[in-house]
Image: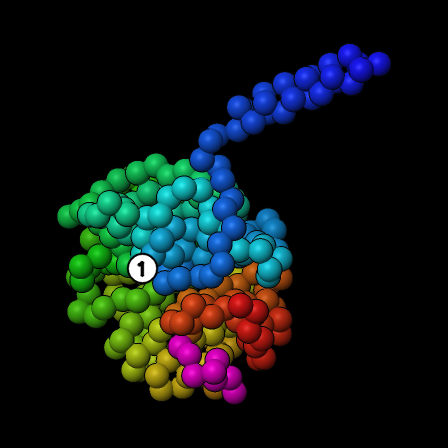
Amino acid sequence: MKKLIIGGLIVIGAITGIIAQSLPKNENLMPVNEITHGHGLSVDVADSDKVYIATHHGLLLLQNEKELYQVGDSKDDYMGFSPHPTSSKIFFSSGHPSTGGNIGFQKSIDGGFNWEKVSDGVGGPVDFHAMAVSPVNPDLIFGWYRGALQRSTDGGKNWEVVNNTNFVTVGLTADPKDENIVYAASPQGLMVSKNQGKDWSFLLDGFVSTIVINPQDSQKLISFSEKLKLARSIDGGKNWEPVDESFDGEIPLHAAFDTQKPEVIYTLTEKNSLYKSTDSGITWNKIR
């Protein structure tokens, strides 16, 4: 009987070892205590309980609003970060390697555990500080680098400069229904282009830190600006209604809708506080 128990343990141990060896060694989720220096925010398109935070020190995953993990081993600075609109395993990023320099434009196909460089961009390697992937056409990607808006129409392999902007861009957001429309948040205001970044017009004056679009209704926008603070629009940005929310005096820098539950929105502030709304941005609760 003793031999059977020992034999069983050996078999179980061998099977466990085989399974462990079959997994990529760097597909790790390491618990961490806090969010530091956030640069991007997204909700998993397949699982509403997963929120990803791109940071100065790698990619984080918040699960069930409780457990916070470092995704993989990379501690690179993801200045630009965009999820694929339909695949929960595909992410795009740009920024700086932890060893210094610029990343260029890169892609992950395994949920952010591993990254592969796709291209340098124009005049690169680039470090896009703002990026956006079109939800309508994932091959259409925008990135802002050194005063110029770049555009790729083949998933980031090739890029062209479409506008030498005279404004700093802190955020780019692509329309979920029309691939020609893209929004830019900047210290000069909120701008919109209706021809894929070639020409721009103002929707709001003054510093705008973030803009986010309802994935089911592209006429519904939420922004945070110096002029109006938190505000909502139901007509594509022509008119705005301020929302009575102070975020304890902190400034929202990034925001993301839950595509499965469009009434749910998250925002990350400059002090790395994470807030959540379950009523389309009317009321907010601090969750971390």
Residue 67 appears in which quarter of the rendering? bottom right
**In the foreground, 106 or 184:** 106
- What residue is at 34 percent from the left and 36 percent from the top? 116
Residue 96 appears in the rendering: yes
Considering only vertical position in the picture, is 15 above or below 258? Answer: above
| Residue at left offset 28%, top offset 52% | 95
Q: Residue 258, percent across and down?
A: 56, 60
Describe residue 205's horizontal placement relative to residue 12 as left or right: left
From which residue to which does the magenta span run? 244-251
Percent x, y for residue 137?
Answer: 43, 48
Could you tell whether 116 is left or right of 5 in the image? left
How many other residues sit within 10 Å of disc 1, few (<14), some (14-19) or many (≥20)? many
Q: Where is residue 134 in the image (x, y as percent from the top left)?
A: 41, 53
Q: In which quarter of the image is the N terminus?
A: top right
x and y percentages locating residue 163 in the rendered image:
20, 60
> Magenta region's main secondary structure?
loop
Q: Can I make out residue 159 in this image?
A: no
Q: Mark 1 points at which residue?
A: 130
Asked if the stretch drawn in magenta spans residue 249, the answer is yes
* Mark 1 residue element: strand
Q: Which residue is drawn at 58% across and 79% down?
A: 283
| Amino acid type, residue under disc 1 in the picture | Ala
Q: Which residue is located at x 49 percent, y 40 percent?
A: 28
